[in-house]
């Protein structure tokens, strides 16, 4: 639950004012995310598909923040398949909101996530 809350704040509200995220809080959110292990990365991926976060991933400003989050998560991920799943999301952040329906993404994340 805490991971989802931090992600919700870090992805932002999609507003043009300050890009929808507190500039003073962004480094703290990133620091929290950088302390996660692979289980935390899995929880993050699952959180992207919660209703409150998934709807934000259709917003271009939130997609910019998503790229930053994904880069942070990829930097701490140990499992190669998880890294490949994050790479898939990074390659097309504009499609990330529906990636859980993508066969390739589901296959990469299936050892960790039961969709």
Image (cartoon, helix red, strand yellow):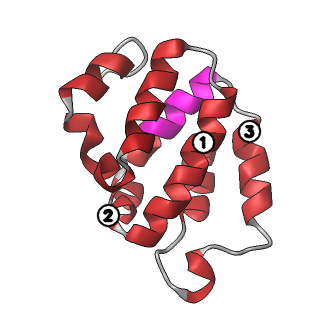
Query: Where does label 2 land, which residue?
Result: 58
Looking at the rendering, the stretch of residues picked out in magenta corresponds to 38-45
**Dot 3: element:** helix
Q: Which mark is first along the chain, 3 or 2?
A: 3
- Relative to residue 38, is residue 74 depicted above or below? below
Query: Where does label 3 land, which residue?
Result: 34
Of all residues shown, which one is farthest toward the bottom? 17
- Label 2 packing within 10 angstroms: few (<14), some (14-19), many (20+): some
The image shows residue 65 at horizontal and vertical percentages of 55, 60
Query: Where does label 1 land, which residue?
Result: 71
The answer to whether residue 81 of the structure is visible from this angle is yes
The image shows residue 80 at horizontal and vertical percentages of 52, 14
Quadrant (top left, top right, bottom left, bottom right) of the C terminus: top left
Quadrant (top left, top right, bottom left, bottom right) of the N terminus: top right
- Label 3 packing within 10 angstroms: few (<14), some (14-19), many (20+): some
- State the residue at coordinates (25%, 24%): 104
Q: Nearer the viewer, residue 60 or 26?
A: 60
């Amino acid at each position: 639950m805490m991971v989802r809350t931090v992600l919700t704040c870090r992805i932002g509200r999609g507003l043009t004012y300050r890009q929808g995220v507190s500039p003073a809080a962004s480094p703290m959110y990133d620091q929290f995310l950088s302390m996660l292990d692979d289980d935390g990365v899995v929880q993050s991926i699952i959180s992207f598909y919660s209703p409150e976060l998934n709807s934000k991933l259709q917003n271009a400003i939130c997609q910019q923040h998503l790229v930053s989050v994904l880069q942070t998560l990829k930097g701490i991920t140990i499992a190669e398949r998880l890294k490949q799943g994050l790479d898939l999301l990074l390659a097309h952040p504009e499609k990330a909101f529906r990636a859980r329906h993508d066969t390739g993404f589901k296959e990469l994340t299936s050892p960790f996530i039961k969709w």
